[in-house]
Amino acid sequence: MKYSYYPGCSLCSTASEYNLSSEAICAKLGIALEEINDWNCCGATVAHATSAHLSVALPLRNLVLAEPQGLDVVVPCAACYHWLRVAHHQVVENTPAGRRANQEMAAVMGQKYRGSLQVKHLLEVLMEPQVLAMIKRQLEKPLTGLKLAAYYGCLMLRPGHVVAFDDPEQPRQLDNITTALGAEAVRWSDKVECCGGSFTLAESGVVSKLSADIISAARRGGAEAIVTACPLCQANLDTRQQEGTPKMPVFYITELMGVALGMPQYKKWFKKHLVDPMPLLKEKGLV
């Protein structure tokens, strides 16, 4: 299996552990990732808040760059996935925004996007039957006894007619990978609630309240940690836990896959977390 790879800005900076773990587990599972040459920021979250045109044109440029390679694009970041899918949709549906952005690509880059690619979130690739079978065969340290709240957030699955690869209200893909690793995916209420990612700097009080509510809901559901596939969600939930309450680790799914597949690199990945996940993993006998 081979894909064009779009890491996006967060995975090359504040969420570098997500990038490293994504690349590592894909290599372990025989999934070849070819990073798009000269990729640019998709514009999340500034562009769509300031310019409707840029919110399509910026992600579209990456699709134009990827299309000649003939490889579908895999994206780990929920926000990047969302906006690349939106740009693809605008062109394929021949909307005015899509036509304008594509005409600009032709003028500036000398080529248009033909709409021949599929844009997939990394979870979609990991849930391919052959990949899931490979995961189960390579398990070295099943996450037995670990109770996890699978948190999707809002950008990965909404709007459903444009981006969703799972049920936007009752998704299961992240839960299914969690259970395939041997952990328990708890039932809880807030798996698709917004953490306020777009307001991280502008409305920090709102974001703190939303994040605290999600952590509380996970705890009420019986979770010992949260697992996600979005760098904005992970950053908010990891950094905005309330003083005076027990801290809850917030993992990327790829990090937990690294633990379960016996990959020692996870120790470096966890150093980026503010809430140290190692005590919980040691308590469960997983490290």
Image (tube, rainbow, N blue to C red):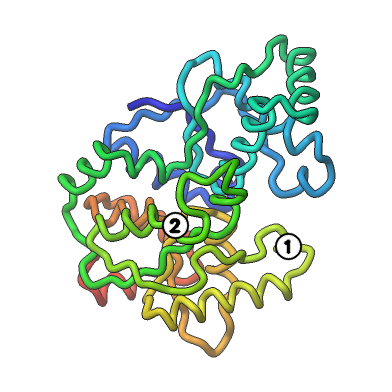
Q: Position of residue 96 (x, y in %)?
A: 80, 28
Relative to residue 163, is residue 90 depicted above or below? above
Q: Position of residue 224 (x, y in %)?
A: 37, 76
Q: Nearer the viewer, residue 214 or 259?
A: 214
Relative to residue 147, is residue 132 depicted above or below? above
User: For residue 70, which numbered disc appears in the image?
Assistant: none
**Residue receiving disc 2:** 171
Q: Residue furthest top?
A: 110
Q: Position of residue 120 (x, y in %)?
A: 48, 37
Q: Nearer the viewer, residue 191 or 271?
A: 191
**As shown in the figure, which amino acid type bears the numbered disc 2?**
Pro
**Residue receiving disc 1:** 199
At x 44%, y 83%, the residue is 220
Q: Residue furthest right?
A: 50
Q: Position of residue 270 (x, y in %)?
A: 41, 60
At x 22%, y 52%, the residue is 262
At x 63%, y 32%, the residue is 89
At x 65%, y 60%, the residue is 197
- Which image quadrant: the C terminus? bottom left
Contact between marks 2 and 1 (CB within 8 A): the answer is: no
Left or right: where does residue 228 sit relative to residue 184? right
